[in-house]
Amino acid sequence: MMNRGDRFLLFLAFLLGVCGALPAVGADDPSNIEPRADRILREMSDYLRSADQFTFRADVAYDAALVSGQMLRYGGTGEIAVHRPDHFRVEHRGDEKNLRVVFNGKTITLHDIDADLYAQKDMKADIDTAVDRLFEKFGFSVPTADLVYSNPYATLTASVEKGFHAGMHTVQGVRCHHLAFSQESIDWQIWIEDGPRPLPRKLLITYKDEAGSPQYEVELSRWDLSPRISDAHFEFDPPAGAGRMEFLPTEEAEDAP
């Protein structure tokens, strides 16, 4: 069965992801979210939605439990490019995997750089639909996919039970609003830049129902909301000698050795 670390690494591309099927309060009913926190989260969402294309860097650290119960921490760095409504690319280098993910509105490609294997699937869709289909059919999700959705606010708050403003704190020398939210199975925090550029600068998720309460943390930097990205950046040319493999639906993937 694919573990959270594998899913994260394979789908780092979707940075700020699907939180799973949890009881939903819904973005249209933010009554359990403190008004100040709700306003700042909406401002961040609106700011990202205003950009047709953007690039950023994600420095990630996440916990993985051994059979003994001991928790290990792994990490990696991703370079992400998004061109709405239907293009994105991720280059990830990490402790466990080095991967490339490319989506051009017609085809999704995952390339395991270390093994020199890639999987491709036809997928004519926008980014929102592509992420949803991959989660529903293949069981892949990551906590950071929400930011590339067309409406990050709606996705982030879909299962929130309560939220509040935790203070003004600094991330990478940038003064940020520190917001905290709670859901049925997870607690999560987000740090959003103060001022005219309300960009997300850090995300921390705690899986409170899992043994040892493992965490997922990502710092977001090098934001560029007006990059020059060619269409060729979202195409995948297999390296010479690279092997091809198939996507497996969720049931088959879990049964595979």
Image: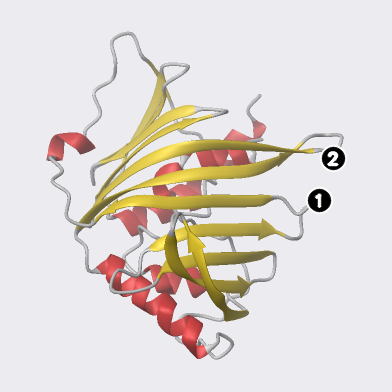
Q: Count numbered badges in the picture.
A: 2
Tell me the residue at 64%/71% (across/down): 183
Q: Position of residue 69 (x, y in %)?
A: 84, 40
- Label pair 2/1, CB-CB below 8 angstroms: yes
Mark 2 and mark 1: Cα distance apart in space: 8 Å
Q: Earlier in the sequence, mark 2 or mark 1?
A: 2
- The residue beneath circle 2 is 69
The figure's colour scheme reads secondary structure
Other residues around mark 1 within 10 Å, as few (<14) / some (14–19) / many (≥20): few
Q: Relative to the observer, which residue lies in front, 27 or 21?
A: 27
Q: Position of residue 1 (x, y in %)?
A: 66, 35
Q: Where is residue 195 in the image (x, y as percent from the top left)?
A: 33, 74
Q: Tell me if residue 235 can be seen.
A: yes
Quadrant location of the C terminus in the rendered image = top right
Q: Relative to the observer, which residue lies in front, 95 or 22?
A: 95
Tell me the residue at 33%/44% (across/down): 80
The image quarter containing residue 23 is: bottom right
- Secondary structure under tag 1 reads loop
- Secondary structure under tag 2 reads loop
Looking at the image, residue 208 sits to the left or right of residue 254; the answer is right
Other residues around mark 2 within 10 Å, as few (<14) / some (14–19) / many (≥20): few
The image quarter containing residue 225 is: bottom left
Tell me the residue at 20%/36% (across/down): 233
The residue type indicated by label 2 comes to Gly
The residue type indicated by label 1 comes to Ala
- The residue beneath circle 1 is 211
Tell me the residue at 39%/60% (across/down): 147
**For the view shown, which residue lies furthest in the front direction?**
173
Q: Residue 109, labelled with which disc?
A: none
Q: Is 208 placed above or below 167 here?
A: above
Q: Tell me if residue 251 can be seen.
A: no
